Image (cartoon, rainbow, N blue to C red):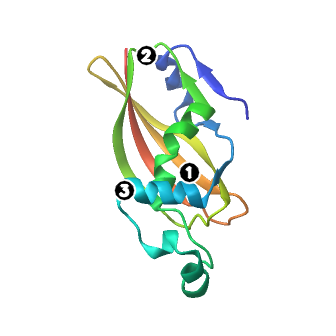
Amino acid sequence: MARLILDDPRKLAEFIGKELGVSQWHLVTQDQIQQFADATGDHQWIHLDAERAKRASPFGATIAHGFLTLSLISCMMREAAEIRDARMIVNYGLNRVRFPAPVRVNSKVRARFSLLNLNPVSDGLEAILTVTVECEDAAKPCCVAEWVLRFYL
């Protein structure tokens, strides 16, 4: 799917209930998992101890933090769609987040973005996106979220 480019955030109204785009695949490495653990202070063994994870976890390998997977949606959104001519775009937060499946080390993930709703707010628009992060060759998504973005005009 080609990257969606809209010259005006108001044109998002045409995409309510539709997919906006899909990102490229991103490899999740052990180094990236380690850096995230160091940045957040979450050093749980299931993320960092490859030998123990291989031996003792149901996943057979280290896995990415759920919040690491979630944090990738910003960069993946830029790959899937570009909404131009907003004075400012603000990450307003999340309504729902679930992590139905793990992201094993050295897996590839990508995100699908759909527009659930678009509402007027003071000086702009509030977009509620459904984000589904897929893991290559996995039956279930590894993250499903409702993401709220505000486009100030």
Q: Quadrant of residue 60 in the image?
A: bottom right
Mark 2: secondary structure: loop
* Residue at (68% x, 41% y) in the render: 24
State which mark lies toward you, 3 or 2. Answer: 3
Residue type for callout 3: Thr
Quadrant of the image for the C terminus? top left
In this figure, which residue is indicated by the disc labeled 1?
A: 132
State which mark lies toward you, 3 or 1. Answer: 3
| Residue at the extreme left | 122
Label 3, label 2: how far apart the Cα atoms are:
31 Å
Density class for disc 1 (Cα within 10 Å; few <14, some 14-19, many ≥20) is many
Question: Where's residue 91, x and y in %?
Answer: 37, 35
In this figure, which residue is indicated by the disc labeled 2?
A: 86
Above or below — where is 112 with respect to 2?
A: below
Q: Earlier in the sequence, mark 3 or mark 1?
A: 3
In this figure, which residue is indicated by the disc labeled 3?
A: 40
Above or below — where is 55 with respect to 123?
A: below
Quadrant of the image for the N terminus? top right
* Residue at (54% x, 87% y) in the render: 56
Density class for disc 3 (Cα within 10 Å; few <14, some 14-19, many ≥20) is few
Q: Which mark is residue 91?
A: none
